[in-house]
Image: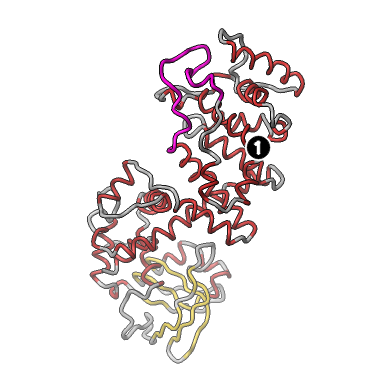
Amino acid sequence: MSIPEDFLHYLWKFRLFSQQGLATAAGDSIEIISVGLHNKNAGPDFESAKIRIGKTLWVGNVEIHLRSSDWERHQHQLDQTYDSVILHVVANHDKDIFRTDGTKIPAVSLGALIPQKISDNYLRLQESMEWIPCGKQISSLNPFHIRTWLHRVEIERLEEKSGSINEVLNEFKGSWDDAFYIFLARNFGFKTNAMPFEMLARSLPQTLLARYKNRPLQIESLIFGQAGFLLSKHMDEYPEILRKEYLFLQKKHLLQPMDNYLWKYMRMRPVNFPTIRLAQFAALIIRSNHLFSRILIETDMRKIIGMFDNLPVNDYWRKHFRFDTETACSYPGFGKQSIDNILINTVSIFLMAYGRSTDSAEHISRSISLLENLPGETNALVNRFKETGLNVENAFFSQSLLQLKKAYCDQKKCLSCGIGMKLLNG
């Protein structure tokens, strides 16, 4: 069986090979006291290993290759960083290798020591054509083990997502409120209009909107005007009032509106039209400027959810999805699914990022608690996981499944996945 190098890493890390009579290529006995710490950065693969070779106890690093000759192919013989290697672990030993000072490095070949069962399980996962590598096997595992791993995967997702906040946070000189405002606006555009929504937010700083905190008409005119919807006259009274107000505010604050063509309507239900989303965004700003400050001090998850519910959208939108075009349909409100999307993809992420940045266990816990208080999402991918017997009772686990699929299953990282590792070991 042809095996990749990361499989050898896995075997060494968890000692999944026969250690009875283990010896170097030169015939010296090997006793592994500690395999060392897995190094995923530059340098030897495992650091601070403790190994007895013959009668001598060595403490140093371990390097792993498929063939001993890979040492020279990677030019380690010229790099003093690798002089600390005390054992060269390979699948096949095809030549002796040396440090920069000419001393030989002991080698051990694991090729013939790999249990057939583990090799077969690994091959089965890697050659699987299922929608996930373990599609036919995952149901055989203890649900508790799966859920324990999914909990870790979701924490990984929250930490990964929160890391992307730092760049915007630095841009706004550490202002969490301003960074949250940008991400919130982007989320309001969902996938289709995320970019123009972010452009809008960047053209309308919160400090400007805060000056009109108790003046809804001015906030609506600023948002629709900057979005490029008030550049020409309108037939209806409401948008025409907004336009005139915006012309005044535009001159007063030296504003440059966006190009209207940036907003997308294609293959979109009317309730998701950018005009409706802008009206809802304006309503949220009217209700609460500097929203993240409120979220930070609010410990009741129900009240945080309520901040996005029943937004005071202008009555004009009860019978319109666009300016100057009346509809027989009634405005359905800011839907629960949309609210959940923002809570999952912006609020929980920011609570985690803030908690990690300030070492606040409370906010990290609240990030997780928020997801646990939201229902599990319903989509084609989550439904496929449900078909395996998984109970997806809240958003914390539905999000962990999406992360599992993207970060592990799609890349066939079974050796790094708690589920894959369990199946490998039978």
Taking the image as shown, residue 12 lies to the left or right of residue 286, namely left
Could you say which is closer to the camera, residue 4 or residue 322? 322
Taking the image as shown, residue 228 lies to the left or right of residue 3, namely right
Residue 57 covered by magenta stretch: no
Q: Which kind of residue does numbered mark 1 sit on?
A: Asn
Q: Is residue 10 above or below residue 397?
A: below
Residue displayed at 68% across by 42% down: 171
Taking the image as shown, residue 358 lies to the left or right of residue 260, namely right
Residue displayed at 44% across by 53% down: 372
Name which quarter of the figure residue 6 lies in: bottom left
Q: Position of residue 304 (x, y in %)?
A: 54, 46
The quadrant the N terminus occupies is: bottom left
Q: Position of residue 75 (x, y in %)?
A: 50, 63
Could you say which is closer to the camera, residue 243 or residue 47? 243
Could you say which is closer to the camera, residue 145 or residue 1? 145
Residue displayed at 61% across by 30% down: 199
Q: Which residue is mark 1?
A: 289
Q: Secondary structure at mark 1?
A: loop
Q: Residue furthest bottom?
A: 55
Is residue 407 something that shows in the picture?
no
Q: Position of residue 22 (x, y in %)?
A: 34, 83
The magenta region covers 314-337
